[in-house]
Image: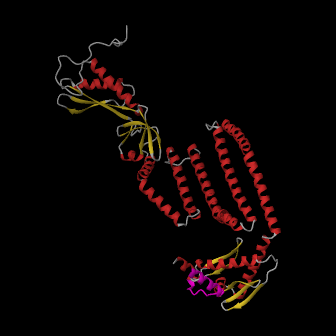
Amino acid sequence: MRALVIWMMSFLLLCSVASAQSEEILLPQQEREDPEFIAPVVVDGDELFVVRGSSALPATDRAAKIEERITQVADRSESKTVDIQISRAEFGQLVRVDGHMVTITTQADADHEQMDIEVLAGLQAEAIENAILKYREARSSEGRVDSTLAAVAWTALFALVSYFFFAKRKKFLGYVRNNLEKRAESVEEATKSILRSRAIASIIVYSIHALMWVLFLFFLYYYLSLVLLSFAETRAIAQVLLKYVSEPLITVVLAVIGYIPNLIMLVIIAAVSRFAIRGLDLFFDNLENGAFEIKGFEAHWIAPTNMLFRALVIVIALVFAYPYIPGSGSRAFQGLTILAGIMVSLGSNTVVSNMMAGLFVIYRRSTNVGDRIMVGDKIGDVTEIKLMETLIKSIKNEMISIPNAQLLNSEVVNYSRKVDGRGLLVHTTVGIGYEEPPKKITAMLIEAAHRTQGLKKNPEPFVLWTQLADYAINYEINAYTSRGSSLPKILSDLHQNIVEVFNENSTQIMTPSYMADPQSPKIPTEEWDGKLAHIAE
């Protein structure tokens, strides 16, 4: 069955050739313009012309038959002249070479080339004549000698390059390494950089070594292609090899050349953006140095405002540069942009909220660098306000990072901010039994406040009754201070002084709870001698 199918296909092919290959391609115009119905005629790697095909005789089969006839005619003789005859046939213009039919130029070919059929037949005949003469010349004795000499020359050049590559490569890389280490050492000494010269030199030498290998492999590839190109029998293989590398490289080079106008526009946009950013830096540097002032513009706003304006300039530059970016109009680039936008929108809710909160924290003036604040149960001094977080150093010398979103949504107590001229009000509560005279307790609490360093004596400290509890009255001592950053120490000293004053006056503090009246007040009866039990005399 398979043999029968092959025989039938061969019969149809021979019939088509016998009919001078001139059958008109009776297809709609849209199908006749399809590249699948067009094939080039190639001899020794050179494309002579293209032919049209049909469903009965595909263009590739027709081109292969023409190539076979051309080579057969060229092999029959070594003559340096060719007898070309063009005659009118039933299906077009018949082209004979040395009395042998080679091809028929059909009306379909002429329609494809958009020229008169007689003119096209003449051009195809001329291309066939040149191809035959070139074919014979390449296979002549002189041609063989020239091909051999060309191959030997390329081989000698390749051997010379290979010798220098393998014999002198290490010496050259060592020379480069030594010079780089010397230059890197001088840079380190001048800039006091922590970089190591050997590390820098190793990275650069490795890159140069890799580049040398890439260039050598390219040269090897082209050497093989050029040697194969020197001989007529292997020229087609060489052209295929060159096509796989040369055409992509040429395409890249042409694309780069064609992209130069867009590249110039990108350079202009980048230069203008850089100029604008440098102008912003100069403006805000002078503002920070006090060269001029903006009324109501605080000093700690300078850095974040500069950053915002820089970001705005960069975003505007990207918007203008987008149409000039390579591949920006392709569907792949647009799909990648959409995917990146979706990923950012899904994964950056917290990031965006913290950034927006950071801007509010910076510009709403509730907290400044150096302020002592309390956020939740965290107390510390603000050391840095970033776009995403605020850093505070606790009173225990701990560095605490608070997300700006939390800072914006929490109650912040600022101990450094002065609401009025009196200062911050320090307060603490003690519970004293009902049997003690309230005026005495008030006087003792005020005395403890007077003894505490850091509390103001003007305005005068005062006492409030905060609660009439079951077994005691809760007295609250209040005193002003202007040293909010020292609040823990001031409060500790106040507690200590309260205990000392109450002990001196034989008054018992009943806070935090009460169980029963003791026979004698719970106060120290003797002064401490200043020595601990585990310390020897």
Magenta-colored stretch includes residue 146 = no
Q: Position of residue 367 (x, y in %)?
A: 43, 42
Viewer-nearest residue: 357 or 47: 47
Q: Nearer the viewer, residue 483 or 210?
A: 210
Q: Position of residue 257 (x, y in %)?
A: 67, 64
Which stretch appears magenta? 7-30
Q: Residue at x 76, y 86 (%)?
A: 85
Number of numbered callouts drawn: 0
Vertical side of 487 occupied by 412: above or below? below
Name the residue at 76% across, 53% down: 159
Q: Is residue 204 above or below residue 433?
A: below
Q: Is residue 27 magenta?
A: yes
Q: How is the image coloured?
A: secondary structure
Camera-nearest residue between 32 and 61: 61
Image height of 317 relative to 173, above or below: below
- List x then y, in percent, for residue 243: 66, 65
Give left or right: position of 97 versus 63.
Answer: right
* Res. 29 visible in picture: yes
Give the farthest residue toward the top. Answer: 537
The residue nearer to you, when weighing 430 against 144, is 144
136 sits to left or right of 24: right
Q: Residue 100's quadrant in the figure?
A: bottom right
Point out the image quarter for the C terminus.
top left
Q: Can you tell which quarter of the image residue 510 is in? A: top left
> Residue 471's x, y, as percent?
17, 28
> Visible in this render: residue 250?
no
